[in-house]
Amino acid sequence: MTTDFRVLRQISQQLVFPSFVRPEEVVAWMGAMQAQDYNMVKWAVGIRLKGEGGFSVVQKAFDEGKILRTHVMRPTWHIVPAEDIRWMCALSASSLQATIRDKKRMAALLLSEDTFRKGCRLFEQHLAGTTGMTKDELEAIFVAEGIPCVTGTMYRLLMFAETIGLICSGIDQNGKPTYALMDERVPPTPERSREESIALLAERYFRSHSPATLADFVWWSGLGIREARAGIEEIKDRLELLTIQNTTYYLHTEAAALISTPEAAVHLLPAFDEYTIAYKERAEVIHEAGRGRNQCSKNGFFYPLIADQGNAVGLWKAEKKRKALLVTTTFFAPHLEPNSLLLQAATERYLSFWSK
């Protein structure tokens, strides 16, 4: 895979030549960003900001409800702009609820349709007028109200309430995410037809993830192939075709217009970052020495990756020692270690983000 391909991906993803100074602008450009690791997704936004924006700027956007965390597209958390959360929830509700209602899981988690209905009533009752409550606080209330909760029960109840647009993320409590009523966090927005929503989702994806394939879009969006094709068809006048090694990629014209040659740079990519997680095939941007087991754990947890000129060459992690953050790195092969000054700059940028 050519370096130019990775340059296109980095530009589309706002990792080089970033355009936005406000966190909500970054998220709106990306469409949605996978977010089961809450701290890492804050860094995922920060690494894409233009200028010196730090953690406090990103956290403020979350607390003010400009960015919200919920389940959309696939059965995992994403962050989305407030103005998009309602149509995104409506678009993915049926597919996510099919996962939630898996009979074996419902039986194992002591769930029933009556439980979902009672849970939604309790969410409305106890979250009204609050800035948000944590999962643990809500679970204690549910148990007191007679809803048995084993490991995973509350998670499914919360996800169900998110899919129907009842709840979304609230204001953090001591660094912990909370849940709040969506109607108290998000002003009303016009409804969109399913066809309009799919076309808009395709627009957001290819604008921010180019070059990408139909299969990539299907994976990211959670849509079936037929609807994904229809979305691409709706925006075809803004897509160019790029064929590399017999694979056809779509390149959004808005991303293509940003093409330039970036300076050499290393990035400490967050776990589950869109640069890798948002594609069905990831070999284009991961060095062959690191493909397979090296970039994720046995249970599929995607580790934070070190990207050298857009090519993932190793892993990194940050640990607190004596009240200070310490970043350690490992590489898929010794010869893949990046230029020390570039790696140092990437590390300093990460540490600086959390100090601001």
Image: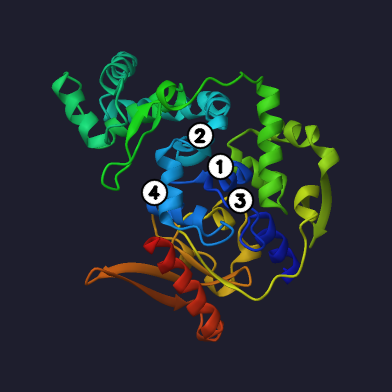
Q: Secondary structure at mark 1?
A: loop
Q: Which badge, 3 or 2, comes first in the chain's sequence?
A: 2
Q: Which badge, 2 or 4, comes first in the chain's sequence?
A: 4
Kindly indicate whether the residue at mark 1 contacts the one at mark 2 (C-beta within 8 angstroms): yes
Viewer-side label of 3, 2: 2
Image side of residue 144 versus residue 246, left or right: left
Q: Is residue 148 above or below residue 80?
A: above
Q: Which badge, 3 or 1, comes first in the chain's sequence?
A: 1
> Residue at (82%, 42%) from the top-left corner?
238
Q: Residues within 10 Å of mark 1 (few under 14, many from 20)?
A: many
Residue carrying label 2: 72
Q: Which badge, 2 or 1, comes first in the chain's sequence?
A: 1
Q: Residues within 10 Å of mark 2 (few under 14, many from 20)?
A: many
Residue carrying label 3: 280
Q: Residues within 10 Å of mark 4 (few under 14, many from 20)?
A: some
Q: Secondary structure at mark 4?
A: helix
Residue 41 image label: none
